[in-house]
Amino acid sequence: MVNVAVMGAGSWGTTLAKVFADAGNAVTLWARRPELAEAISTTRENPDYLPGIELPAGISATTDPAEALSGAAIAVFAVPSQTMRDNLTAWAPLLPADATLLSISKGIESGTYMRMSEIIAELTGAGEERIAVLTGPNLAREVALEQPAATVIACADLNRAKLVQAACATGYLRPYTNTDVVGCEIGGACKNVIALACGMAAGLGLGENTQASLITRGLAEITRLGNELGADPRTFAGLAGMGDLVATCSSPLSRNRTFGAALGEGKSVEEAKKATRGQVAEGVISSQSISEMAQRHGVDMPITHTVYAVCHEGQSVPDSITNLMGRSKKSE
């Protein structure tokens, strides 16, 4: 048993707090809002993000980051990618010296084009052997309902990845290890953008052929970017690549797919927020960072560029489909 701090009480952070507690660990869940921490403590439920899911007694909730991080062997960062830097700036002095720093956020920082593990390294001074990421086909509510699923723990230090693996293994979540941090993070960030495209197609009423084509060609462009950045191409055929992509592109539980479907139905970006409880899907923001990163590295990512054009340049969804289909013919 180890002490685990989960910094962020959204749906995925709360779900992983449950996973770590069910695996026999003592878990402290940090929430930004006092009323949410109080609700978790008194009702054993997160009413805002996981209503109806009973949380185990092994979870305690707090709004004090120092209390959450005190004595933690594993610190889990469960905040949106674009707020990771600000949060870590405040938390870095509170981190135990040898704690494993685990990111579960999927995105690329705007402006810097940094992955979450790179931000963690910059702000904490931790070496790559202490920084891990968790990713895979993990829709939060399904995992919280204890439906069987698998995930990936990636760390440059395989032994540390195995320690996290042991700490989050339950009868319903099977973790695998990987040392390809770059590939796992690129897969996790880019799949959100492809899921937006799949949602847009669904919103237009298009069928399974279109969905399958977007997923397959989406995986191809994700792999191209990953290869350029030094990832192991095999990663993209596994849980962190194809697995996460299929789940996020296919499920109505996916915020990115839901957001894209609203855009496909003709709603504006602001109107689409209502379909995701006022939250902007990660892929909307990441589409700009990833599109710009691809251009900087000379990587062809037509679906990503198209999603960016819809979300940030006002291009209509029907026009975006026409543009994709009208691209010059080439070998697969």
Image: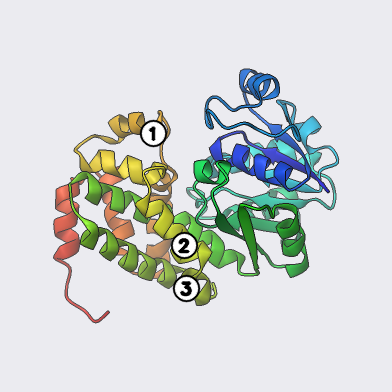
Residue 225 at x, y = what percent?
A: 43, 68
**How many badges with numbers are in the image?**
3
Q: Which residue is mark 3?
A: 228
How busy is the neighbourhood of tag 2: few (under 14 within 10 Å), some, or many (20 plus)?
A: many
Q: Amino acid at mark 3?
A: Glu
Coloration mode: rainbow
Residue 164 at x, y = what percent?
A: 73, 56
**In this rendering, position of residue 110 left or right of residue 40:** left
Q: Nearer the viewer, residue 30 or 58?
A: 58
**Residue shown at 28% from the left, 63% from the top:** 212
Considering the numbered disc 2 on the image, is that residue within a helix, a strand or a loop?
helix
Considering the numbered disc 1 on the image, is that residue within a helix, a strand or a loop?
helix
Q: Nearer the viewer, residue 184 or 237?
A: 237
Residue 119 at x, y = what percent?
A: 63, 51
Q: Amino acid at mark 1?
A: Thr
Q: Which residue is mark 2?
A: 243
Compute the Cα span from label 1 to label 2.
23 Å
**Residue shown at 38% from the left, 48% from the top:** 251
In the figure, 259 relative to 151: above or below? above
Q: Nearer the viewer, residue 290 or 242?
A: 242
Front position among marks 1 and 3? 1
Q: Amino acid at mark 2?
A: Gly
